[in-house]
Amino acid sequence: MAEHIKTKVLVVGGGPGGYVAGIRAGQLGLDTVVVDGDRLGGTCLIRGCIPSKAIIHAAEMFEQMSHAAAKGGHVGISLSEPPKLDLAATVKWKEGIVDRLNSGVTGLLKRAKVRVVSGWAKFSDAKTCAVGDITITAEHVILATGSDPVELPHLKFGGDVISSTGALDLAALPKRLAVVGGGYIGLELGIALRKLGAEVTVVEAAERILPTYDKQLTAPVAQWLKKNGVEVLVSTKAQGFAGGALTVEGPDGKKTDIKADKVLVAVGRKPRTEGWGLENMGVDLAGRFVKVDDQCRTSMRDVWAIGDLVGEPMLAHKASAQGEMVAEIIAGHKRRFNPVAIPAVCFTEPEIVSVGLGPEDKVNGEVLNASFPWAANGRAMTLEGADNGGFVRIIARKDDHRLLGIQAVGRNVSELSGEFAMALEMGATIEDITGIIHAHPTLSEGFFEAALRTLGHGIHV
């Protein structure tokens, strides 16, 4: 039976941007409807950030147990037999985490008195959409449709050619895996599957892996790949896959075949702009993204867009921040989206975190740049993360010592991203960091020591 819903706020998409916008709007007393054609939580929760980190953790455990069996226990722990992998059971465990988080999001929306309509929205104009036989009209529309993996024309998804989604749902470990794309998604999953026992080859069209980060920052990851037998082919383009072989073209134009049971294509993501009637809404585009201002307003009055739909960085935490902001603006609060920096993390081996400007970015005036190696940090040693070439680095203005950027590469450094981002957002100087007593023994001491070195008087190096 047909139904017509009139609401104050309509949120299209139940990912980290959409569901946060819905919850905050509900908390503020706004009549709110969230429409989602998938499970609540979006790509990040269902088939991206969360499940990939679960698989990465399981892979790390497996690798540690394998080393304990092979090396006789170099930390005093040994196993009489190598560990056995049941990938189907690992995937089931991962799905249990996803299910719990999905249920949590559902409960939070219900508590905020937000109505959830399941199905794909199709807009007929800027304020009206149909979801099956339900028509929804809203005063305010928040577009949070997210993004999809980029598919190469000569490597269509299907069969043994898989996206990151397929890589997280493998029923069995492939003996040989080819990864097309040496960015963070391809390397995170490729490294995890290598730890689980797959033979991995990475094919990257750029001159080096992780090309959006500086070479010094990515060198420890390249070192791990080489040490662990992962073949990396840079300046190389994938041509096609047939008969269990991926054909690639090297920098010299020569074509070769790489044997592979599965090919993971991870060359980026694109905003989901098709299939839900964007063309009927009259909003302006900026290239492949929806054009918005610093409040996430589109060119249509009271139509807002957030997250991957509006541009780089395509990160879940950016989408969540924008979703919360838009809900508050609709409720009458004065807000704008103008972060000093948005942290980016690669859960590779070792991990990489970058906040703010890097050493290759242009800055007006002179800068100070110094780093502190994890080899001199006691906590890194106890985590067996002191010998991978990792470090933490600070970039600051020379004239006033204001922090401009902070980067780190090493084991568990992702957990420092909050401290790094907070320092930049609060306009900290080098002296602000050196004036804070950091707990011992922790990785955070490395940040303190890097600040001291920037001033020219490091203690533990």
Image (cartoon, grey):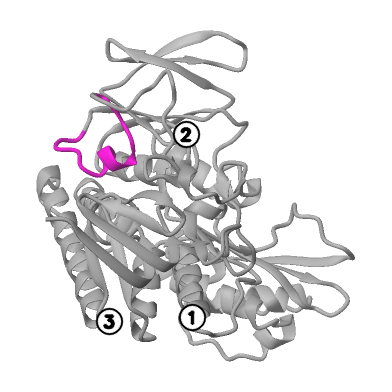
- From the viewer's side, name the closer residue of 136 and 393: 136
What residue range appears in magenta?
160-173
Name the residue that disc number 2 marks. Answer: 181
**Sequence-first tag of 3 and 2:** 3
**Quadrant in which the C terminus is drawn:** bottom right
- From the viewer's side, name the closer residue of 457 and 137: 137
Name the residue that disc number 3 marks. Answer: 112
Mark in front: 1 vs 2: 1
**Sequence-first tag of 1 and 2:** 2
Q: CA separation, marks 1 and 3? A: 14 Å
Whether the magenta-drawn stretch holds residue 165 is answered as yes
| SS label for mark 2 | loop
Q: CA separation, marks 3 and 2? A: 41 Å
Q: Which amino acid type corresponds to the residue marked 1 in the rendered image?
A: Glu
Q: Position of residue 78 (x, y in %)?
A: 18, 57
Q: Position of residue 276 (x, y in %)?
A: 37, 45
Picture residue at 27% right of the left edge, 34% below the top = 198
Q: Which amino acid type corresponds to the residue marked 3 in the rendered image?
A: Ala
Picture residue at 31% right of the left edge, 69% below the top = 6
**Sequence-first tag of 1 and 3:** 3
Whether the magenta-drawn stretch holds residue 419 is answered as no
Rendered position, 428 above or below 396: below
